[in-house]
């Protein structure tokens, strides 16, 4: 049954990837003159014709699309017009940086957000609950670029503890990871708190409490297992969300050399080939992550029916 579900979800994912790839291809042909957008205004007619042929834009659009899909299936993303290097090489260099940043940020958010949500649920409407709820709301409300700038002003410019931008060492990772983690932390804490409060109202939990079973034991033995699906869902969603584009602002502000930063630079330089490849890779990652999360949910709660 699980294998059937995995195959079905994989096929659905392939449809999503095909849809995203088709959408970017069509939009790139509708924005006007792609060659004109890539070249200077005073470019010669010969250079313009050369680039048109290089991109295959002299052929009918359906033929261009089939050729593009065939290249993707062979793992050939083409040559970046901006960097004059294989796009696959650029993505291979940048993608690990984004995976590291997003992975650390979501782990940090989960490591703090889940215990915070449990503590808030243990004492509902207490000062700690209100404080954690306010912090979670703050994390949800503060714009990410504003949060990133505040972190730089305080910890880099003011205190001089951490570098303002770049990569290459653990200190470079701290501020961008915090900037990406805080909004996710708020959402994870909020979902954990709400799920645990609902679980505490269930008959078996109330019966256990009436029999004098310690509250901490109930939460650890029964509550966490029962809210595992909700918590795993929100954590997986946060990781997918970060990799799907919400890392662009953070990577740009902190000069983090990830795929989000290179995507923005490709858009600024009208590098059609690189933009199409980045969208394809991000769609592929999102599909794979969603599939992994769905299968993990089945492991956490075997009662889930496919």
Image (cartoon, rainbow, N blue to C red):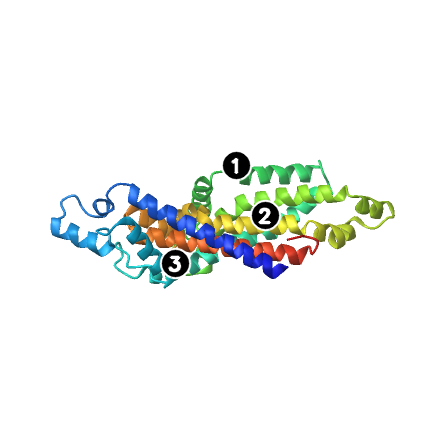
Q: Rounded to the nearest whole Å, what is the CA distance between mark 3 and mark 2?
A: 26 Å
Residue 190 percent across, percent down from the top left: 62, 42
Residue at x 72% of width, y 38% of height: 124
Residue at x 41% of width, y 55% of height: 281
Instruction: Estimate how packed mark 1 is, as few (under 14), some (14 to 19) or many (20 or more) residues with alpha carbons within 10 Å.
Output: few
Q: Is residue 233 left or right of residue 56?
A: right
- First-in-chain label (3 vs 1): 3
Residue 118 percent across, percent down from the top left: 68, 46
**Image vertical order of residue 73 relative to residue 223, above or below:** below
Residue 141's disc is: 1
Q: Nearer the viewer, residue 1 or 215?
A: 1
Q: Which residue is mark 3?
A: 94
Q: Which residue is mark 2?
A: 234
- Point out the frontmost of discs 3 and 2: 2
Residue 295 percent across, percent down from the top left: 60, 57
Instruction: Estimate how packed mark 3 is, as few (under 14), some (14 to 19) or many (20 or more) residues with alpha carbons within 10 Å.
Output: some
């Amino acid at each position: 049954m699980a294998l059937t579900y995995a195959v079905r979800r994989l096929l659905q994912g392939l449809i999503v990837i095909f849809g995203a790839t088709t959408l970017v291809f069509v939009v790139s042909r509708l924005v006007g003159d792609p060659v004109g957008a890539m070249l200077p205004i005073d470019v010669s007619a010969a250079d313009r014709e050369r680039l048109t042929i290089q991109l295959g834009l002299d052929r009918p659009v359906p033929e261009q699309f089939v050729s593009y899909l065939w290249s993707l299936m062979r793992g050939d993303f083409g040559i970046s017009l901006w960097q004059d290097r294989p796009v696959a090489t650029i993505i291979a260099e940048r993608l690990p940086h984004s995976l590291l940043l997003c992975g650390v940020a979501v782990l940090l958010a989960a490591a703090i957000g889940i215990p915070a949500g449990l503590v808030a649920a243990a004492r509902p409407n207490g000062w700690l609950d209100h404080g954690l709820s306010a912090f979670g709301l703050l994390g949800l409300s503060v714009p990410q670029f504003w949060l990133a700038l505040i972190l730089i002003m305080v910890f880099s410019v003011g205190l001089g503890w951490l570098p303002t931008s770049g990569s290459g060492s653990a200190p470079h990772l701290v501020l961008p990871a915090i900037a990406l983690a805080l909004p996710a932390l708020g959402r994870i804490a909020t979902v954990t708190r709400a799920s645990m409060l609902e679980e505490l109202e269930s008959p078996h939990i109330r019966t256990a409490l009436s029999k004098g079973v310690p509250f901490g034991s109930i939460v650890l033995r029964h509550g966490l297992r029962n809210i595992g699906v909700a918590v795993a869902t929100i954590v997986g969603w946060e990781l997918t969300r970060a990799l799907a584009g919400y890392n662009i602002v953070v990577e740009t502000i902190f000069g983090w050399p990830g795929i989000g930063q290179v995507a923005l630079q490709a858009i600024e330089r009208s590098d059609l080939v690189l933009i199409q490849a980045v969208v394809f890779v991000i769609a592929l990652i999102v599909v794979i992550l969603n599939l992994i999360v769905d299968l993990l949910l089945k492991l956490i709660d075997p009662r889930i029916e496919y």
